[in-house]
Amino acid sequence: MITCRRWLHGVSLTLIAACAAASISHAAPCMFAELGDGHVSEIVDARSVRLSDGREIRLSGIEAPPPEQQAAAMEALAALLRDRDVVLRGEDDAPDRYGRQRAFAFIAGADEPAQSELLRQGAVLRGIDLPDGNCALSLAAAEAEARSARRGLWKIGTVIKNTESPDDILAGVGLFTVVEGKVLSVRQTGTTTYLNFARSWTRGFAVIIPKRMMAVLEGAGIDVKSLANRQVRVRGWIEAHAGPRLELTQIAQIEILSGN
């Protein structure tokens, strides 16, 4: 049985949206502990703002779109948050290695974070730093809505890369990328498991699953070996080996789509 809690296992976009709606009706999403507030004075990039007190806030739960859409993403972020007072919510106010505070930004009085609106507009991509299930469901539903309506970056139809075009995927080395295709085989070498999306293991696209992630996936009800011949969507940063690779480090990186 598929449950909303296991939202990444065997779900379609319709089910994601339905689960999100059910969850939101019981509790507002992404309502973590309050980490303070501030006034947005500057847009740093497609996913970061600076407050008037000098703090740089990295908006949790979203990632920048492909380079050609980043200017539009910054415009959308500016229209939403520049010169606005915001309440910051999150699990931890410790700065990241770049000195930024990660948080969900709420315009005063809003019951949804700015991230949800940016995703709904198709300005950004859903990220993978989503430890809370209700929050993850809500952001996934917002992105799915934009994709279905072909808003923003989804108008161009090439945001999701096809595993049958490895050279196209390799062009995004180092970039956060969404990739979709059919798993042709599941292979284990030592402590590492590979989801192979091409018959050529070396040249085609593959997802790398380290040993520690196998237990996480199994705990979420995902039998990795059963993914052969399943349609899968993954997201993360592309690495170049002989062919394009993506390492799975968070469960929010993988969606197992309906059907075979």
Image (tube, grey):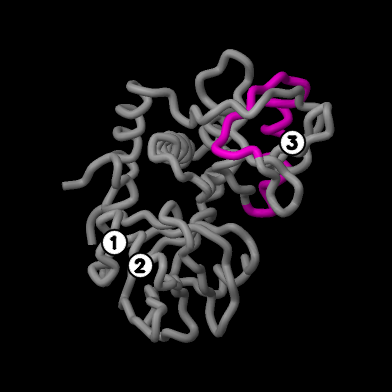
**In this orientation, does residue 93 appear?**
yes
Q: Which quarter of the image is occupied by the C terminus?
A: bottom left
Which residue is rendered at x = 21% and y = 46% of the image? 2
Q: Give coordinates of residue 49: x percent, y percent.
A: 74, 36
Figure check: 162 above or below 67: below
Q: Mark 2 points at which residue?
A: 214
| Residue placed furthest toward the top | 109
Residue 19 has which mark? none
Figure check: 122 above or below 53: below
Query: Please, what is the three-letter code of the amino acid marked with disc 1?
Result: Glu
- Helix, strand, or loop for circle 3? strand
Q: What stretch is highlighted in magenta?
A: 66-93
Q: Which of 51 and 236 is in front in this view?
A: 51
Whether tag 2 and tag 3 are in contact, CB under 8 A, the answer is no
Query: Please, what is the three-letter code of the amino acid marked with disc 3?
Result: Val
Judge the density around disc 2: few (<14), some (14-19), many (≥20) Cα neighbours within 10 Å: many
Q: Nearer the viewer, residue 193 or 75?
A: 193
Q: Mark 1 points at which residue?
A: 218
In the image, is 99 to the left or to the right of 187?
A: right
